[in-house]
């Protein structure tokens, strides 16, 4: 049934045969459409009824305004009482007749979105947490070699150095090769479908690893995990920003990294008493509730708008914001943004051509270098080879429990980093943390370099020193280096080349992870464990120099101001204050 924009929200036309009631927009007394008037005058049993008689049949309306896109018809069965909502039916499959916060009846998103008592923050947090369960899976993929490789050695299933490095680094190789296509897949299928397909892929990978009897079977499992991880990384990077409002975006986007670190921590914890095959089975069982949660997840409003699913955009926004929040303005902003993007957004070829200009090339290059120095700290090697490192250090402490402590030290700083990033200048924070990390790595490397030459090994009384150095490094990396580097990348990247630039940056980042993971065992064989960490310490200190000399302070600056500073070469050490 059609309605005009001049009809009042307090007025509703009723068709006698179908008894259709419709929530109408504001506008005073208004007027009826020709179709509505004819339906009422000519309907069986309804002919000749006055306006006052028809008004008696109107259902009560919510006290808060329902945007035009949400005003969905309510259909009442012939024999039903019009005051009852049990027999009301909404045309939109994502809504049903239910009372709003004031107790009035109207078409609202189904109860899977939660009752009206849930605040907008809780609604958005719940959706972000469900989507970021993918980060939990990514964390288990990255940390699994740390506990599986030592267990296989203890059981007599020994891999060569080359096989060890490929097992640990294969997901990163896959990410390098597929990160461009991953974004296209997510854009085509949507977050929800990709997450559900990823669960099936992960289940297959863990089954293959659990029953594997050869290196090639293990490698096949890791390839499947790399494919899934590359798609999941796109989702946990984009989805939290697209479903949250601006004032909570910083917290929501930080959840993804926290979930990755939590996945690593849980993997280390499982490795204390379980064999790799049992860990794989445990992860398979954990995927079942994830699949159920993903089934009820809402796709992001921006993605739905890009797919021209206008009705679902409105119902999803209502679900994320709550039935008492007016979504009209935000809905129009989303539609305008998508329309503008379609008109003005440069193609991939045009973005590549823009990179010939220094104003676009320089920020992309600086972003790549920021991530390079981030990975030259050796953090991925520390994650993938945690247990082996403590065994090589000769520590008297249980290496598996040391890995658990390291996992906790990676996870907990994710929450403090949100506060530090908001309160401290970017360069001050990252330089301070890199200096502390360099000192911790240098101390660890020097200690291991001298003690590795002694034949009697590390005394039990000094076994805590490697753990303490690693703990300091992990805490400062999680509190400042990791999150601040990604914040700088997001702020430096120009919007006109954001898609292609992000593809280049993610490709380089995956390549850096692969090279660090691949080179670590060979470096230990050639240089010794002590000199490896001294090298990481020197690279980290070089990162401090790079930040001071090449990067501007971006805290509190708009994207336009950042680009102005970059093109004007106005880099001052005094900006750190």
Image (spheres, helix red, strand yellow):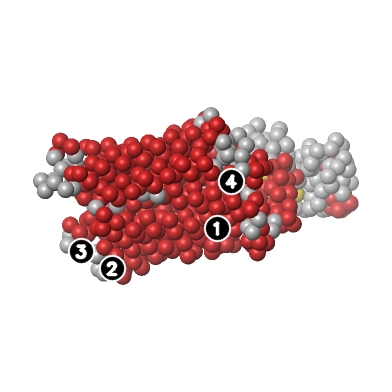
Label 4 to label 1: alpha-carbon separation: 15 Å
Q: In which quarter of the image is residue 229?
A: bottom left
Q: Which of 370 and 176 is in front in this view?
A: 370
Q: Residue 492 carries which label?
A: 4
Label 4 to label 2: alpha-carbon separation: 42 Å
Give SS at disc 3: loop
Give SS at disc 1: helix
Discs 2/1, front: 1
Circle 2 Cα neighbour tier, 10 Å, few/some/many (<14 / 14–19 / ≥20): some
User: Taking 337 as reference, is 472 above or below it?
Assistant: above
On the question of residue 235 being in view, the answer is no
Q: Residue 503 carries which label?
A: 1
Q: Which of 312 and 159 is in front in this view?
A: 159
Q: Which mark is residue 223?
A: none
Residue 483: x and y in percent read: 47, 42
The residue carrying mark 3 is: 157
Residue 64: x and y in percent read: 70, 34
Q: Do the residues labelled 1 and 3 touch (CB within 8 Å)?
A: no
């Amino acid at each position: 049934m059609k309605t005009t924009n001049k009809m009042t929200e307090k007025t509703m036309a009723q068709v006698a045969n179908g008894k259709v009631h419709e929530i109408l927009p504001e506008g005073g007394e208004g007027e009826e459409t020709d179709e509505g008037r004819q339906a009422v005058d000519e309907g069986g049993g309804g002919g000749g009824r006055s306006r006052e008689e028809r008004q008696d049949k109107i259902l009560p309306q919510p006290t808060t305004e329902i945007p035009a896109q949400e005003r969905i018809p309510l259909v009442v069965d012939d024999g039903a009482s019009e005051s009852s909502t049990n027999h009301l039916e909404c045309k939109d499959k994502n809504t049903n007749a239910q009372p709003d916060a004031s107790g009035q009846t109207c078409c609202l998103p189904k109860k899977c979105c939660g009752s009206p008592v849930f605040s907008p923050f809780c609604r958005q947090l719940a959706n972000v947490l469900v989507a970021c369960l993918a980060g939990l899976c990514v964390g288990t993929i990255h940390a699994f070699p740390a506990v599986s490789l030592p267990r296989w050695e203890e059981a007599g299933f020994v891999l060569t150095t080359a096989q060890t490095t490929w097992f640990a680094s294969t997901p990163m190789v896959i990410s390098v090769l597929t990160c461009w296509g991953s974004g296209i897949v997510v854009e085509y299928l949507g977050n929800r479908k990709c997450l559900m397909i990823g669960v099936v892929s992960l289940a297959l990978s863990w089954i293959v690893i659990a029953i594997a009897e050869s290196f090639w079977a293990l490698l096949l499992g890791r390839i499947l995990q790399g494919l899934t991880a590359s798609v999941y990384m796109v989702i946990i990077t984009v989805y939290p920003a697209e479903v949250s409002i601006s004032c909570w975006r910083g917290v929501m986007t930080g959840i993804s990294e926290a979930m990755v670190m939590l996945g690593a921590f849980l993997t280390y914890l499982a490795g204390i008493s379980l064999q790799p095959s049992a860990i794989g089975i445990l992860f398979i069982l954990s995927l079942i509730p994830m699949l159920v949660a993903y089934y009820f997840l809402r796709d992001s409003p921006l993605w739905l708008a890009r797919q021209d699913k206008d009705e679902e955009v409105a119902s999803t926004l209502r679900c994320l914001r709550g039935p008492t929040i007016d979504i009209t303005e935000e809905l129009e902003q989303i539609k305008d943004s998508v329309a503008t993007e379609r008109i003005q957004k440069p193609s991939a070829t045009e973005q590549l051509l823009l990179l010939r200009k220094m104003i676009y090339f320089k920020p992309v290059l600086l972003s790549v270098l920021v991530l390079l120095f981030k990975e030259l700290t050796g953090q991925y090697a520390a994650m993938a080879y945690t247990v082996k490192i403590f065994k090589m250090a000769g520590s008297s402490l249980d290496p598996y429990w040391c890995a658990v402590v390291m996992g906790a030290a990676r996870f907990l700083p994710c929450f403090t980093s949100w506060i530090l990033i908001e309160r401290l200048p970017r360069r001050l924070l990252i330089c301070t943390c890199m200096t502390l990390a360099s000192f911790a790595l240098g101390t660890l490397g020097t200690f291991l370099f001298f003690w590795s030459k002694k034949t009697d090994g590390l005394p039990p009384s000094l076994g805590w020193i490697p753990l303490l150095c690693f703990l300091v490094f992990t805490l400062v990396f999680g509190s400042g280096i990791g999150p601040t580097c990604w914040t700088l990348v997001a702020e430096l990247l120009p919007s006109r080349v954001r898609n292609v630039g992000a593809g280049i940056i993610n490709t380089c980042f995956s390549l850096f992870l692969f090279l660090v993971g691949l080179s670590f065992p060979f470096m230990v064989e050639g240089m010794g464990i002590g000199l490896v960490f001294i090298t990481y310490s020197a690279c980290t200190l070089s990162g401090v120099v790079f930040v001071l000399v090449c990067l501007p302070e971006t805290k509190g600056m708009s994207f336009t101001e950042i680009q102005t500073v970059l093109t004007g070469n106005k880099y001052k050490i005094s900006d750190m204050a």
